[in-house]
Amino acid sequence: MSGLPVEKPRQTWRGLWNISFGFFGIQIAFGLQNANISRIFQSLGSDVGSLALLWIAGPVTGLLVQPIIGHFSDRTWGRFGRRRPYFLAGATLAALALIGMPNASALLAAALLLWMLDASINVSMEPFRAFVGDMVAPSQRTTGYAFQTAFIGAGAVLGSLAPFAMAKLGVSNVAPSGGVPDSVHYAFYLGAIAIFAAVMWTVLTVREYSPDQMRGFGDTDVFGHDGHPAALHGGLWWLLGGLVVIGIVRWFALERDLYVLGGALAAFGVLALVAAAMARNGGRNALVQIMSDMARMPDQMKRLALVQFFSWVALFIMWIYTTPVVAQYVFQSTDTTGKAYNDGADWVGVLFSVYNGVAALAAFVLPVMAKRIGAQKTHMLCLLIGAVSFASLLVIRDQWMLLLPMVGIGFTWASILTMPYVILAGVLPQHKLGIYMGIFNFFIVVPQLLVATVMGAIIRTFFPTEPVWTMACGAVVLVLAALAMLRVRTSAEPNVAA
């Protein structure tokens, strides 16, 4: 194809719906996971201080899966398309993990199934982020990501509410010691059907652009190649940093959870050193390319990465600790076999459904706000609303009053899912959307790893019987995220009009 690049055709509302509908099923699975995994772990015998460590399978898997899937999805072209094979493979494996999770009979089995579930969801989810950039014109980018955010919110509402709804329909929400209630079993089975069916909808209704068409739209290298790799440095420092953390943990007899953090830093350093050695010898494999792309991150992406880091620290604190906080302080129970605890756990599903429902609606308010005050100020405002909402959880003791901070968190969640990606899509090279979306999600995964290793140690050391203080930590890091947005340049912002 020759001549000047042309803009991609504008998608109809039906087209935008089909492109992102698979995210609806993915988020049903995430909603079930976020609202119920701590409940399952506690039912199988975990104490509150150990919850974060048991969640660690997800972030460790994400660090490996996300950039690899992003890298290869940029380069996959076949009869089934570029991104769609990854959607389908991930959804199939996630459905199997959802079926197995409530049937786990031991903590180790549940942790392994969480690892499988998180990895499988990432296989589907990361290409979906790039899919919007592939399929929509720049002038529709904000609307495209707003659709995705709306489906994320709607799917999470259903996923979060499912056990509560099952209980209201008469399905038992209590189980003997060491067991999981039937309401959770049936909710996870429905989630397995939902993720597979929703992803299949997108796979069957959307036809991806061919390589020739992508070239016509101005993507000169649709297979993601970019010549010589960047100079790779810093691997030794990452390795030494990890070893120092491990040494400090051992010398001062700190919590063993922190070994995971040190090991992750050291492992990243080793990979960086290996990639640098391969690059010096002319290597052009996936590891070299991924590390090279990390070294070439646009400045705007680096600034947004810090914002993303702080934002997701708060989110993971909420997902891990809301159940024990609500059960203990509002429903006055820490007995996982009792009705009061399980009523509290069900109410957390309601709370999570509220903030996700608000996010689904707020997704279409944010572009209007961004048009008036700019993407930077819009995101800052939503992050500060989230900080106030987290802080209010320190004092609210009425279950219905808990709905109010969930409204604020809904706006924060919608903004986190929309505004950074709108800004990113305007500064990233089109043929690298997959890999850079995967790398950007490092700054979702690393916070989860940090919370999983550090927060448990903080709880056991400073407030072993008062998990509510985790919400204060969440409020503080959301304020830091808002302050970090001051470094994001507004001059490079894309058109944010819906």
Image (cartoon, rainbow, N blue to C red):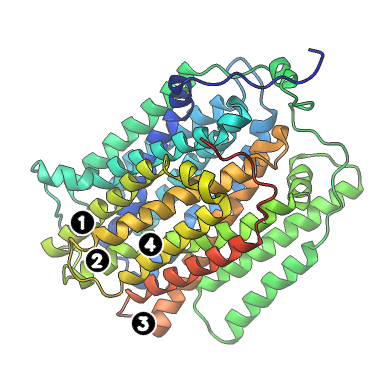
> Which label belongs to residue 318?
4
Q: Specify the amino acid type for callout 2.
A: Val
In the picture of the structure, the residue carrying the numbered disc 2 is 326
Q: Residue 316 location in percent, x, y?
A: 44, 60
Q: Is tag 1's residue or tag 2's residue first in the polypeptide sequence? A: 2
Q: Secondary structure at mark 1?
A: helix
Q: Earlier in the sequence, mark 2 or mark 4?
A: 4
Q: Amino acid at mark 4?
A: Met
CB-based contact (under 8 Å), mark 4 and mark 3: no
Counting every numbered tag in the picture gives 4
Q: Amino acid at mark 3?
A: Phe
The answer to which quarter of the image holds residue 437 is: top right
Q: Is residue 478 depicted above or below 272 in this figure? A: below
Q: Which residue is mark 3?
A: 463
Q: Is residue 466 left or right of residue 331?
A: right
Give the mark nearer the N terminus: 1 vs 3.
1
Q: Is residue 252 above or below residue 422?
A: below
Q: Is residue 18 left or right of residue 447?
A: left
Q: Which residue is mark 1?
A: 347
Name the one closer to the observer, 41 or 2.
Answer: 2
Q: Residues within 10 Å of mark 2 (few under 14, many from 20)?
A: many
Mark 1 and 2 residues: CB-CB less than 8 Å, in contact? yes
Q: Residue shown at 16%/42% (left/top)?
A: 166
Residue 206 placement (x, y as % from top left): 51, 19
